[in-house]
Image (spheres, rainbow, N blue to C red):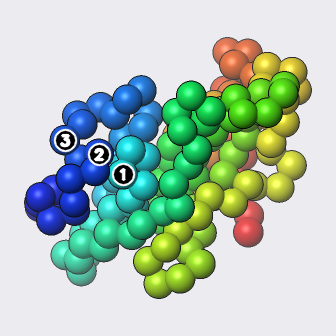
């Protein structure tokens, strides 16, 4: 269903990305979503309408500065990532939501009160996925999973 040759050469020849999580796929009962951090693209397939939509996302900093550590697609269609930012001291991590500033240009916006010092009090260390409308994540990689409902 997805002809990657129509999406441009940047990043689509990678099978797993430069690191785990850079290219990822999630499904809900009505959509299939593919996040390609290497090419800065969000690909969404709506099952009921049989429509494919490809959107550009503002590129993240270089992978030595910032990495995607988790990705989730909620049943309502919201897209989230956890990011690890090593460009600041101390390094930071947190939860970000994909929002669109134009018809097909997305950007990552921090979710309020989720960004903090990595391994030193960040409220979201790694996004693990979803349970319907709830996000599942860890805090500071402590090994405990937390569930939280996202409200806009």
Which class describes the residues within 10 Å of circle 3: few (<14), some (14-19), or many (20+)? few
Disc 2 + disc 1, Cβ < 8 Å:
yes
Which secondary structure lies at badge 2? loop
Residue positioned 53% across, 68% down in the render = 106
- The label on residue 39 is 1
The mark that comes first in sequence, 2 or 1, is 2
Residue positioned 56% across, 49% down in the render = 60
Q: Nearer the viewer, residue 130 or 9?
A: 9
Mark 2 to mark 1 CA distance (whole Å): 5 Å
Query: Which part of the image, by quadrant, shows the N terminus?
Result: bottom left
Residue positioned 86% across, 49% down in the render = 113
63 vs 65, left or right, is left
- Is residue 87 at all visible to an observer of this figure? yes
Q: With respect to residue 87, does 100 lie above or below?
A: below
Report x, y in % for residue 54: 32, 69
Disc 2 + disc 3, Cβ < 8 Å:
yes
- The label on residue 13 is 3
Which secondary structure lies at badge 3? loop
């Amino acid at each position: 269903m997805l002809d990657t040759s129509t999406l441009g050469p940047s990043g689509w020849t990678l099978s797993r990305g430069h690191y785990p999580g850079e290219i990822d796929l999630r499904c809900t009962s009505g959509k299939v979503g593919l996040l390609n951090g290497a090419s800065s693209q969000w690909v969404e397939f709506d099952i009921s309408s049989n429509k494919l939509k490809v959107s550009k996302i503002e590129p993240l900093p270089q992978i030595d500065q910032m990495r995607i550590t988790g990705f989730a697609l909620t049943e309502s269609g919201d897209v989230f990532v956890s990011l690890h930012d090593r460009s600041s001291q101390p390094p930071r991590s947190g939860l970000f939501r994909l929002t669109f500033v134009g018809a097909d240009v997305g950007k990552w916006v921090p979710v309020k009160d989720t960004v903090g010092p990595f391994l030193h009090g960040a409220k979201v260390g790694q996004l693990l996925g979803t349970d319907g409308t709830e996000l599942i994540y860890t805090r500071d990689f402590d090994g405990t999973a937390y569930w939280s409902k996202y409200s806009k």
